[in-house]
Image (tube, rainbow, N blue to C red):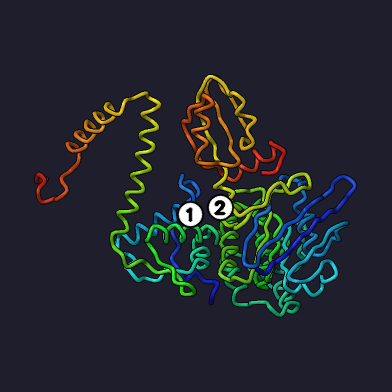
Amino acid sequence: MHSMPVTTPLFLSTSDARPMYQQIVDQITAKVMAADWLPGHALPSIRELAASSRVSVITVKRAYEDLERAGVIETRHGKGSVVAERTELPRALLEEELGRHLAALLACAARLGLAHTELHRLLDQAAARDAQSRPPINPSEGPLP
Amino acid sequence: MTAAFTLSGIAKRYPHFTLQDVSLQLPEGQIMGLVGVNGAGKTTLLRLLTGLVRADAGAVEVLGQCMPEGQVAAKREIGFASEDMRLYRGQSLHWHMELIRRIYPGWDAAYAAELVRRFDLRPQQIVAGFSHGQRVKALLLLCLARRPRLLLLDEPTTGLDPVARLEVLEALADVLRDERRSVLFSSHNTQDIEQLADSISFLHQGRLLASADKEAFLDRWRRVVCQGAGMNGVAAWPEIASARANGSLFELKVRHWEADLPARLNAAGLAVQRVDPMALEDIFVTTVRAGEPA
């Protein structure tokens, strides 16, 4: 019965500040990074994902195009999309995200009239505070409860 | 590309209202949202597409048929639902379903049963006892279960409670699975349209203010907050649809965002503080207030 949902929907929300296509890009990337979907895994068709997640076809199409440009998925003409075989993909995406944060940081510093040397000092300070407050990465090295 | 419908140079005059210069096309397999305030001409446009009304000028083609001449042939494949359609008050939903099943060979009984369940309706209940929401859902069910190739829905979510609204939107999303089926739905709830539509058309005072692919639409518009000593003529720039000042703070609604805009604003003495995407509702209201094409 083709009216029954056959694909698990993504979790999309209109109160999320990110545009819908960005939410799709982020969630699929997260699924790939978490190995929910392994390289070669076939993605749902654009129409299928649109219907199950209740967003327009054009929005899913745009998300798939972005994922393809980022190298997360590969689209074979007429055969649909699969998770890309390359494994260093998430890094490129994270670098892209860092780039956006850096641009925002520079814009904010410019408004405060901060020189770049001052910005460096603040960054070092923040990193030092972060190192103190952050729990150890390997739990076995941490203090006993 | 096959078109679900094509309107070319349409005009329709009524004593107190005129629809004019409307040219609009919906590619097959797409969902178009029609946005407009009450009295903008949304219902007139839908009625022209159903062949219920004849245009004074221009051509209407629906599923390859010229309207209204091809009305009879096109009718089997068009599903039209509007609030002013009446059900027989003394009859049950089941009775209506049997009626439609006998008229339309495409009736999908299994899908109808699924919609009854999803819409939480009771087929044996007499329609007179239905709430507004139940009546709207019953009308949509009768329309959807025929699986028409073109669905024309006039305000399908107006007056529904949030749960019923979601049920209706979910049923509409089902249509997306079939690439030969198309939908035109009008609404003044821009959120519904923003989520489901592939393309968006703004109708205002009988004219088409804008019609574009939704992503392009949302991409083009930005709200920019900046600070400076004065506007310095920025408000008159062609891409600025609206500009408001509050002391040294300025809010600009930009209809054609370009990456170089912050630098140009900066050169004009305005330091950009925030650039945010705009919701469709804000874009619509700004377009209507600016009174010119988006």
Say few, some or many: other residues with alpha carbon within 10 Å of mark 1 (under 14 / 14 to 19 / 20 or more): many
Relative to B159, say whether B48 is above or below.
below
The reply to whether dot 1 and dot 2 touch (C-beta < 8 Å) is: yes
Using residue B207 as the reference point, say whether residue B258 is left or right of it: left
Residue type marked 2: Glu
Using residue B16 as the reference point, say whether residue A25 is left or right of it: left
In percent of width and height, residue B216 lies at 57, 51
**Front position in the image: B125 or B273:** B273
Residue highlighted by disc 2: B215
> Could you tell me which residue is drawn at 55 percent across and 41 percent down?
B257
**Front position in the image: B222 or A19:** B222
Relative to B188, say whether B234 is above or below.
above
Could you tell me which chain the residue with mark 2 belongs to?
B
In percent of width and height, residue B232 lies at 59, 23
Residue type marked 1: Tyr
Using residue B31 as the reference point, say whether residue A65 is left or right of it: left
List the single residue furthest toward the right. B15
Relative to B74, say whether B276 is above or below.
above
Residue highlighted by disc 1: A21
Dividing the picture into quadrants, the one containing residue A8 is: bottom left
> Could you tell me which residue is drawn at 73 percent across and 49 percent down?
B208
Could you tell me which chain the residue with mark 1 belongs to?
A
Residue B162 visible in rendering: no
Q: In which quarter of the image is the C terminus of chain B?
A: top right
Say few, some or many: other residues with alpha carbon within 10 Å of mark 2 (under 14 / 14 to 19 / 20 or more): many
In space, the residues marked 1 and 2 are separated at their CA atoms by 9 Å
